[in-house]
Amino acid sequence: MTAHPDSTHVPPRVWHAVTSDLRPVRRLRPPASRALLVAPLALALLVAAPMTFSWRLDLVRLGWALTWGASIAQVIVGLGLVALALREAVPGRGLSAATSGTAFVGAGTMLVVVTLLAATSGDVFRPGDPWRIGGICFGGSFASGVPVVLVAAWLARRAFPLRPAMVGALYGLGAGLMADAGWRLFCEFSGPAHVFPFHLGAIAANTLCGVLSALLLTRRRN
Amino acid sequence: MGTFAGEDTQLRELMRGYQQGRIEAFEELYVLLAGRLRGFLSRHAIDRGRTEDLVQEAFLQLHRARHTYDPAFPLMPWVLAIARHVVLMDVRTARRQPRFAPADAAPEPSVRADADRLADRSAIGAALAELVPSRRSAVVLHHVRGWSFREIAQKLGIEETAAKLRSSRGMAQLRSQLGGPEPPPERRGEARR
């Protein structure tokens, strides 16, 4: 820190804060390339649940598009949402209401359409104990999304989010989509009565978790 | 248009230098941005008397966030986004302030015997304007609005002792500017600190 010179226009309080911490800083990389840091985690989640437990029994009957195709699309949309969150976290580059609205509505519509297509593609399996199976799916899917939420929160905090709730909702939804992408390759229960409350419920819980994490981290910053 | 583009290029270059740790670049940026920030903040602040404090707070936030600026984009949207955030934080802080009892519930303040010797309002206003913003805020909040030092410390984000010190130094400076009586001997040391 250097003494405040009389010649400067800068007030002493600002001068001292700036000169005591005037190291060169490393600029943030573009949001899309920072979002790619989450990609290895997303790919691991895509195969973790089915490889740990088993692949869904109707994998062949549903076909590639409604299984791998829909899951890969979920991962890509999830990564896109994380990229949008990291862009929103940079001052002056906030998303317009139209862009953020399109992101949320688009992701929700995709989930509903895939669920309904899978539910109407033939006979669907029904869980013998809906609440126990539902609890496993909800807990497993939600827990799988938490690591993505944490990594995305750390990336967003390194920026300077001015609307933390929006940032957290975007990366939380993205994390939920990525976690569910793998979980749906393991869970063969395609009925809306199971998917909407437990799978989509887990995505909603991940979104809420994202909002809370972003609010908590920015409160500490302020 | 050409001038605007040239100025934007200059701002980006200065910001790049600031990110590389050059204090001269920051000083030039301060000169170029302070007036615009002052105008923006005085238009949006709920208390115009706090504009100078908000300008300083905005520069502190710009400093913390300087790594997030990408010179590929214009500087002003980045600066104004942070300034808008500073205003919003100030509004939230003001809303959280404790409400004081209504004026009719407060006891009538006593009038000093030497009140007629006190300086008039314009002289006090001029003397207040001479104070540095941090001392002025502390003096006005404590002696005019009646806030406790704890409330002032919370509002300004400083220690309670620092709030007392600012108020005390500000009052000492006011006394000397207005030619008022010296503080009693036991308090002179405090005023000098």
Image (cartoon, coloured by chain):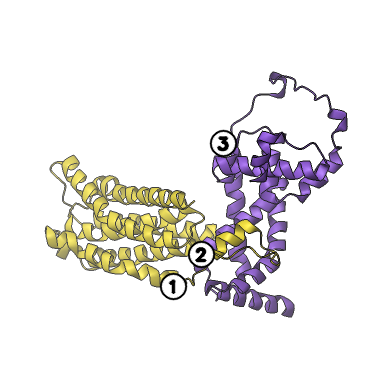
Residue A42 at x, y percent in the picture: 28, 65
Residue B171 at x, y percent in the picture: 72, 41
Q: Which one is closest to the eye, mark 1 or mark 3?
A: 3
Q: Chain of mark 1?
A: A
Distance Cα–Cα, label 3 vs label 2: 28 Å
What's the colour of chain B in the image?
Answer: purple
Residue at the image position 28 percent from the left and 64 percent from the top:
A70
**Type of amino acid at the residue the image marks with label 3:** Arg
Label 2 residue SS:
loop
Residue B72 at x, y percent in the picture: 55, 76
The quarter of the rendered structure image containing the N terminus of chain A is bottom right
Could you say which is closer to the camera, residue B145 or residue A198? B145
Q: Does residue A207 appear left or right of residue B147 in this picture?
A: left
Q: Which residue is mark 1?
A: A29
Q: Quadrant of residue B189?
A: top right
Q: Does residue A20 appear left or right of residue B192 in this picture?
A: left
Whether marks 1 and 3 lie on the same chain: no
Q: Which residue is mark 2?
A: A21
Q: Kindly indicate which chain is depicted in yellow in the rendered structure.
A: A
**Type of amino acid at the residue the image marks with label 2:** Asp
